[in-house]
Image: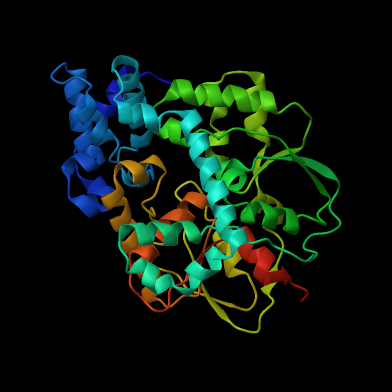
Amino acid sequence: MKDFKDYKEEIYKCSRCGLCQSVCPVFKTTLNECAVSRGKFNILNGIIKGELTFNKNVKKYLDLCTGCNACKNFCPSGIDAREIFVAAKHEYYKNTKLTFFQKILNSYFLFKILLICAGIFGHILRFTGISRLLKLFEKTLLKSGYLGKRLYLFNSLIFKQITGKRTFCSGVKKQKAVYFDGCFNKYINNDTKSAVTHILEDSGIEIIKKDFECCGISYLNDGNIEKFKELITKNLNTLDCDCDYILTDCASCNSVLKEYKNYNETAKALEFGNKVTGVLDLIKNIKFEVISDKKYNIAVHKPCHDSYDFIDVVKNIKGINFIEIEDFDKCCGFSGKFALQNQKISRKISSQKAQHYIDANVDFIITTCPACLLGLNQGLAEINANNKPIAVNLFVFLAKYCKKQTT
């Protein structure tokens, strides 16, 4: 990884054309020039020249970014703004005393405690039947204000066990895959993990469970590189067996695990990254069809860290009506810590996106990232509508509603 000072030429290369304004979800929501790459580069240019110094206000403006990298794809100079912002925030952490709130946000111990508590609370709601009761009074819950909407959002994540056995992809040569379940599957809702196991039951792939830590994407995006490197080392050491794949079902985990080799220049990190494989890569050639006679209206949300491949899998499901939604490939507005630090902006981005799906009268919104599920459900919670779509992980949809196509 390069130091912040090494990005001097890239920062100067920004022509201040303002094209990034047209694709930045935060700028379009706030119209704050400091939220867009051009504005941030002006600030960073001032720091390079010695006119400004890193402080909490500079960090606040750098945090006005979801990390979607849409600006990079639209920049005529091809500048990787996200990479530069990460380096700038890393410089901030090296030279600035953290506030109490920043220490809380950066405590991995407290992060794990929060996840464990959330998981316990979710299981209590499920086993006591309160989750079903909340579902019945969903409309009342959404009208009860901020806390009601947060409870609705949490209740939408409650684990529902996938049962039954359905053959999806038999006859594949026996291989071993170490499963990287991620924080969401591990602590809060293993619905997706259960679905992946279900789909791969007859694939000839032996799934090996290891107790990995968080992939570290939130620490990387926040510029806390030391904490990120600690998690890399722990996860590399956890992989203590031979395998053909390191399997992920999360688009965000998949992208950041492949970046380990850039922050840990060892042969083990390189091998780790080369073995990281998305579940989609193992099943994308399988044809699926829905079990129900109902022709579902299906739309997709493409996570910022995913490719377009999963959309082809969805389009090829027999028995659905695929609907392409405006801005289906634009950021959902959640993005981990961004949603905690900028709640109002996050909710506004999410609700604007959710409205497109409601207007199109879709039954399901399919995605491949748990954070995006949170973002979509957050947006749906903000909108008072009778017929809201269900946001669901691709693998859960395939496991619960589909079977292998026979013709």
Is 256 positioned to the left or the right of 273 in the image?
Answer: left
Is 365 positioned to the left or the right of 194 in the image?
Answer: left
Is 296 positioned to the left or the right of 66 in the image?
Answer: right
Residue shown at 53% from the left, 64% from the top = 130
Q: Nearer the viewer, residue 271 or 107?
A: 107
Q: Nearer the viewer, residue 96 or 25?
A: 96
Relative height, residue 203 to residue 293 (above, below): above
Task: Point out residue 12 in the picture as x, y percentages from the top left corner.
Answer: 23, 27
Residue 281 seen in the figure: yes
Q: Nearer the viewer, residue 398 or 212?
A: 212
Relative height, residue 174 to residue 88 (above, below): below
Relative height, residue 305 to residue 393 (above, below): above
Q: Residue furthest bottom?
A: 293
Residue shown at 19% from the left, 29% from the top = 43
* Quadrant in which the N terminus is drawn: top left
The image's colouring method is rainbow
* Quadrant in which the C terminus is drawn: bottom right
Task: Point out residue 151 in the picture as x, y percentages from the top left corner.
Answer: 42, 58
Task: Point out residue 369 in the picture as x, y percentages from the top left corner.
Answer: 52, 51
Relative height, residue 9 to residue 355 (above, below): above
Task: Point out residue 78 in the picture as x, y percentages from the top left corner.
Answer: 35, 38
Residue 14 seen in the figure: no
Residue shown at 51% from the left, 49% from the top = 306
Q: Residue furthest left?
A: 51
Q: Quadrant of residue 290?
A: bottom right
